[in-house]
Amino acid sequence: MNPAMQQMIMFGLIIVVFYFFMIRPQMKKAKDQKKYIDELKRGDKVVTTAGIHGRIVDIAETTFLIEVEGGSKIRFDKSAISLDASKALNKA
């Protein structure tokens, strides 16, 4: 096997490893986040990416109306809900 062929094989292996350790897990996490957002309903407790804790009061096409402590209500984009923090909140 000549050195050029070995170099091409090594380059191909690096791409495969990069895909399985970087790209694929990121795609799975994005898919899980979208599924979680789609399954949220009124009354669910959530945490935003900014760290704001609240309960969903209303759901619009692209936003949630979240009630925070003290009865205040804030509207957030659906993408602002943190899957990981909300799961940790609901387990506690």
Image (cartoon, rainbow, N blue to C red):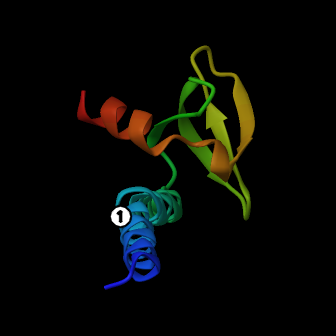
Residue 87 position (above or below residue 24): above
The residue lying at 57 percent from left, 43 percent from top is 81
The residue lying at 72 percent from left, 59 percent from top is 60
Question: Which amino acid, by three-letter code, is at mark 1?
Answer: Val
Determine which quarter of the picture holds residue 57. Answer: top right
The residue lying at 47 percent from left, 78 percent from top is 4
The residue lying at 38 percent from left, 69 percent from top is 10
Looking at the image, which is closer to me, 19 or 78?
Answer: 19
Residue 58 position (above or below residue 52): below
Q: Specify the farthest residue to the left.
A: 91
Looking at the image, which is closer to me, 78 or 65?
Answer: 78
Q: Along the horizontal axis of the image, is 75 left or right of 49?
A: right
Count neighbours of disc 1 (C-alpha within 10 A) and say few if under 14, some if 14 to 19, many if 20 or more. Answer: few
Q: Secondary structure at mark 1?
A: helix
Residue 39 position (above or below residue 79): below
Q: Specify the farthest residue to the top.
A: 70
Q: How many marks?
A: 1
Where is residue 37 shown, x and y percent of the image? Answer: 52, 57
Where is residue 38 shown, x and y percent of the image? Answer: 52, 65
Where is residue 92 shown, x and y percent of the image? Answer: 24, 27
Q: Quadrant of the N terminus?
A: bottom left
Where is residue 43 shown, x and y percent of the image? Answer: 47, 44
Residue 10 position (above or below residue 72): below
The residue beneath circle 1 is: 17
Looking at the image, which is closer to me, 85 or 67?
Answer: 85
Determine which quarter of the picture holds residue 36. Answer: bottom left
Q: Along the horizontal axis of the image, is 71 left or right of 63?
A: left
